[in-house]
Image (spheres, rainbow, N blue to C red):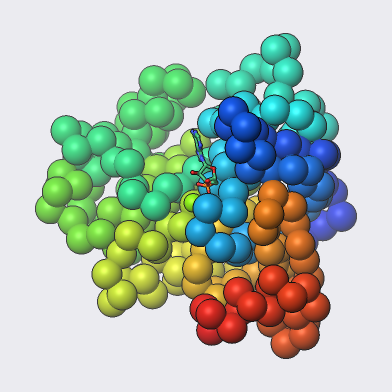
Amino acid sequence: MSHVKTDEALLQVRGLKKHFGHLEVLRGIDIDIHKGEVVAVIGPSGSGKSTFIRCLNRLEEPTAGEVIFEGQQINTKKADIDKIRQKIGMVFQNFNLFSNMTIMQNITAAPINVKKIPKDQAEERALNLLDRVGLKDKAAEYPVRLSGGQRQRVAIARALAMDPDILLFDEPTSALDPEMVGEVLNVMKELAEDGMTMVVVTHEMGFAREVSDRVIFIDQGVIQEENEPKEFFAHPKNPRLKDFLNKVL
Ligand code: ADP
Ligand code: MG
């Protein structure tokens, strides 16, 4: 699929390394992510996919290398990480909604408390976002009353409420019952079509193939292969990628 991709690098990753003690999880990752681009990240379990995207907004502190967002290095003491995190949205596998808050409160909490947006404006925007993910009628409910697919769509709306420049997804459909995967992927596909820049760690090869502009395969701490999806899946070159695709396809 072709999105409103531009040549402007929104996020530049240079020589990114992350060690946990003696465990070298990321051993030198280099990638540019462009405005409007959708990058799918695949790889075996434990290969460092989560660690990689968590380094992109400093949920993990890189051991070495640079992460540059909108021209500004984010992994330095000087960086205003709170400001940067407002611009880098994140959607997790397990939704991470606040169970003691309504859906509306979940979505408006950060805009009101962090961005100081007036409550009525934040709520109006939240309703628009809920409408966008097909859940306008759920504003007053608590998360426990929603299905997994609905909760994840709320989590996406919550991330969008901060008006991010990029959204990071860490296996957004992995915790869902199979019948709910499609509704979440559809919302993500619409975001992609609207030009949102997205990095998506996923096991959904159909999504990677049909929605992403580029697929990267992480294994043994490095990007072993990257390509546009058609070529990536049709003609994998790296033996480890071939082996991986044989197992998952
Ligand atoms: P993936 O998301 O590809 O499954 P992860 O990034 O979660 O992989 O993990 C990569 C490796 O790093 C695994 O061996 C995991 O056990 C290890 N790891 C992840 N987070 C930590 C941590 N906070 N402390 C120690 N080891 C970790
Ligand atoms: Mg993971």
Is 63 in front, or is 21? Answer: 21
Q: Residue at x 40, y 28 (%)?
A: 110
- Looking at the rendered image, the quarter that the N terminus falls into is bottom right
Q: Quadrant of the C terminus?
A: bottom right
Q: With 128 as the anchor, is 22 left or right in this view?
A: right
Work out whether 134 lies above or below 100: below
Quarter-of-image position of residue 10: top right
Q: Position of residue 112 (x, y in %)?
A: 38, 24
- Residue furthest toward the bottom? 234
Residue 91's place in the image compared with 70, above or below, is below
- Residue ranking furthest to the right: 7
Query: Percent x, y for residue 12?
Result: 80, 42
Does residue 177 appear to the left or right of 29 in the view shown?
A: left
Pick the residue in front: 218 or 37.
Answer: 218
Camera-nearest residue between 120 and 18: 18
| Residue 68, position as x, y percentages in the image | 78, 33
Residue at 48% x, 23% y: name it: 115
In the rendered view, tell whether residue 121 sits above or below residue 2: above
Tell me residue 159's x, y (percent).
46, 43
Counting labels gives: 0
In front of the other: 237 or 228: 237
* Horizontal side of residue 101 vs 208, given as left or right: left
Is any part of residue 178 visible from this angle?
Answer: yes
* Residue 132 visible somewhere in the drawing: no
Can you say whether 148 is above or below 248 in the image? above
